[in-house]
Image (tube, rainbow, N blue to C red):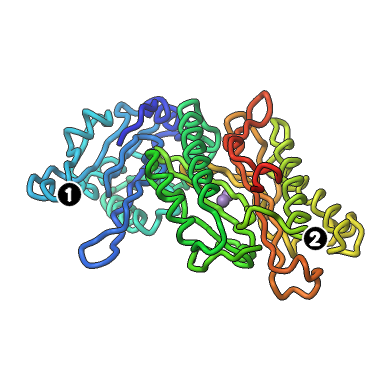
Amino acid sequence: MMLNMDYAQRRERLARQLPGKSVAILMNPKPAHKTGDQDYAYRPDSNMLYFCGMDEPGAVAVIMSADQAKRMVMFVLPRDPERERWVGPRYGCEGAVAQFKADEAFDIGLLKDKLSEILFALDGVYFDFSQASELSPMLFEVVEKLRHRGRHAAEGPRAFCDLRDIVGEMRRIKDADEIEAMKRAAAVSVAGFKDVCKMLRPGIGEWEVEATLQHGFRARGAIGESFGSICAGGAHATTLHYEANRDRLNDGDLILIDAGAEVDYYAGDISRTYPVNGRFTDAQRDIYALVLKAQKEAIKMCVVGNHMKSPHERVREVFADGLHALGIFAEEPKEILEKNLDFEFFFHGTSHYLGMDTHDVGIAYGRGDDAPAPLLPGVVITVEPGLYFTENDARVPEKYRGIGIRIEDDVLITEDGPVVLTADLPKEIEDIEK
Ligand code: GLY
Ligand code: MN
Ligand code: MN
């Protein structure tokens, strides 16, 4: 499925950032085997989707730096009427040229030979190093042969470079088409959560909550979930990525739901924590109110001029005050922060980039967690503070043990301040109690 996005313009922006005579190689993965002759549901590579909108398994796109005559060469599965009768049509080389605007397209079986011709005249090759096991053996083989072939000056590229830095910075800042897609993903995600609010009651299975989300997403046109839904009743919520979803929900417990719809290959990512029977206990309300306060304060920090760590720093301040006030820490807030005591109960970051990948690409921090990246217009991040008190943690007042609460929204940074894409989903106590 090709979306109505300006792929050629994105490729030009990439081409202009590729130095000298170089190319960027994009590749869709091969289908992943599941059982017998079944494969897992196919998900194309996000970079391939971003630059080409090309969704066919195994396809390769070679994008040339700006000073070369050709702009893009593609390698695709050849047409095969017999296979296509079983699994559906292929684009073929003609389709790659006609639909995806490649200058030339070849049978994927010719990739190695053709790469040898292309790389012969190049200085550098850019590809996503997280796909290195697929690509680099072939690239090294091609380059080695080129080295042996040249009599005087060695032929072929001098450098392999990670494409992620260039592409990460491009994809970190969403263009107008992407922001529209992210709004659609957010809206469908919100609708799925609202479906859950209608069916939530003691005695139902966590799996029923999961199924309600899946139905809510798919029925509204989503590809599916952006990641495995977390439907964590009671103390399961203190396991950050509990995805088993196999217990029943007890009267008096909370359920932490962390889920999102993937719409047009863009992710929603929402967390809400609800009282299963519709009413918080006093202890649950204490913690919920603290997490909610921290989340709302952190969202205010999502402004141009701040950086990726600004929301997190604000969450920590609010938590330090609140954890002291609730008697969970005897230490003063200043000491809690200096000694990182809050990390015991809030042991993940507040924000990640959101986009085609749920944890989207783009450098958020320099090496060693320093140099947080600036928040710029078009950046979309999550804001997702949480507090988690395990069942047997004797350091915590008994009434708080077994409580895990996370609240997560998706936030677009704009010149005019934060835009909460998932704002339609209630999170105030009076709005979620029944
Ligand atoms: N569900 C993954 C996350 O919230 O980061
Ligand atoms: Mn999440
Ligand atoms: Mn998240």
* Residue name at image x 63 percent, y 67 percent: 235
Q: Position of residue 406 (x, y in %)?
A: 65, 53
The quarter of the rendered structure image containing the N terminus is top left
Q: Disc 2 designates what residue?
A: 340
Quadrant for residue 63, please give it: top left
Tag 2: amino acid: Asn
Q: Position of residue 92 (x, y in %)?
A: 17, 39
Q: Is residue 192 left or right of residue 372?
A: left
Residue drawn at point x = 33 percent, y = 47 percent: 28
- The extreme left residue here reads 82
Q: Can residue 268 be seen?
A: yes
Amino acid residing under circle 1: Val
Q: Residue at x 35, y 31 (%)?
A: 3
- For label 1, the SS is helix
Say whether residue 95 is left or right of residue 319. Answer: left
| Dot 2 and dot 1 residues touching (CB under 8 Å) | no
User: Along the line of sight, which residue is nearer the eye, 83 or 250?
Assistant: 250
Q: CA distance from mark 2 to mark 1?
A: 54 Å
Residue at numbered disc 1: 87
Along the viewing direction, whichever of 401 and 249 lies nearer the viewer: 249
| 360 versus 182 height, above or below | below
Q: Nearer the viewer, residue 74 or 115?
A: 74
Residue 391 is labelled as none
